[in-house]
Amino acid sequence: MSQPRSVVVVGGGLAAARAAEGLREEGFDGRVVIVGAEDERPYERPPLSKGYLLGTDERESVFAHPADWYVQHDVELVLRTRVTSVDLAARAVTVPGGELAYDALLLATGASPRHLPAAPPGRRVGYLRTIGDSERIKAELRPDRNVAIIGGGWVGLEVAAAARSAGCQVVVLEAADRPLQRVLGAEVADVFASLHTSHGVDLWTGVSVQGVKEGPDGVTVRLEDGTSVRADFLLVGVGARPNTELAEAAGLDVDNGVVVDAYLRTSHPDVLAAGDVARAHHPRLDRHIRVEHWDNAIGQGRAAARTILGTGAPYDRLPYFFTDQYDVGIEYVGDVGPDGYDDVVLRGDVPGRVFTAFWVRRGRVVAGMHMNDWDAIDGVRAVVDAGAVDLRALREGRAPLEELAATAVRPSP
């Protein structure tokens, strides 16, 4: 990609904000335009199901930059505007009323909640993606209200924790045998199940939703076995899908996201993708992955800026995410991937919820996390980075994690 004079970023989320920031920090003095469909300037989404939903974070704290940052850094912020098409040949995007020309285009269109056909959004049925969604849900979380949640993933459990903290009665309906089972496996998923039931959540697992009926006084969720759950409010949290419509219509390669290489370049040399929408080749994992987490949006946004300016490098940061629920917090590094894992090594006080966990496949650590062991994250990351550590020493729990990582067997160059 030759040095551009104009960069257009489609999507007004965190990846877009960090890309613009990265361009200016790297000395780019050309035109930068962010086109976002929402009313708000770019903001961070984790607080929407955590601190902001709980009422412990102020509204202003969720934004990526202060309002005047965009003016001070000469970044054109075009809000409440949807890009309707991309013309790759003309190097322009269409917006209502005209076109925006670009030398380099970054698609940071994010993802949208997966909707259940049985549960369309309504007055008493909500999905969580935007700051407006979070504010609407927060208004529903009042003492003695009954809240039902379909989906025991990160969003569902974080909202469950916020609802219980607000004094609501909460039932979580999960299709798998355990909440978070697909992400964490049975061993650690059981810890989260116990965490929520100990805080009074009514956790239903192995259930299938047959239908949802919304009435003037509440909503009823009918299950496949004939039982039903009544609630004052229903949240649906069953995952997200990447917003690839623009890329598909433009003829870019799409497969569960916009397919990009390790430099975040799409199948067209002038177009990149970053954040939730990007399915990027990860050089360390040697496969394409799409990551829907805060850390990835930050890292890929900045990496895309460097690629645009010709100073980029393969983006090889391992996936990272965190969660806060009740008095428990975790940080997770790595990616188990489609091949799964052979074993889980647990160190520390699992019943007391202060421990580290490592997922192992074919003798190598492929992912790790801590729960409430806040000094451990650097060691966890070091062990996952190293991969081939002494598993016996790791299991015995006596050696410090950094020491295990330092003595790992490194592959031959």
Image (cartoon, rainbow, N blue to C red):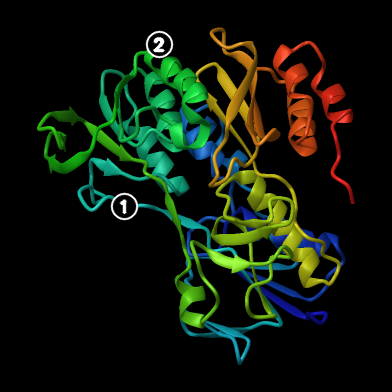
Residue that carries the numbered disc 1 in the rendered image: 115
Q: Position of residue 289 (x, y in %)?
A: 59, 55
Q: Mark 2 touching mark 1, by CB under 8 A?
A: no
Q: Position of residue 125 (x, y in %)?
A: 25, 43
Residue that carries the numbered disc 2 in the rendered image: 198
Tell me the residue at 47%/63% (across/down).
243
Q: CA distance from mark 2 to mark 1?
A: 30 Å
Q: Position of residue 308 (x, y in %)?
A: 77, 71
Front position in the image: 358 or 10? 358
Tell me the residue at 78%/68% (across/down).
307
Quarter of the image where one finds residue 206: top left
Q: Amino acid at mark 2?
A: Ser
Residue 373 falls left or right of residue 212: right
Quarter of the image where one finds residue 408: top right
Q: Position of residue 78 (x, y in %)?
A: 57, 69
Q: Does the image show residue 95?
A: no
Tell me the residue at 11%/39% (across/down).
216
Front position in the image: 311 or 19? 311
With respect to residue 25, does 397 lie above or below? above
Residue 9 falls left or right of residue 103: left
Q: Amino acid at mark 1?
A: His
Among the two numbered marks 2 and 1 on one chain, the one whose residue lies closer to the N terminus: 1
Instruction: Decide: few, some or many residues near mark 2? Use Cα within 10 Å; few <14, some 14-19, many ≥20.
Output: few
Q: Secondary structure at mark 1?
A: loop
Q: Quadrant of the N terminus?
A: bottom right
Tell me the residue at 38%/27% (across/down).
178
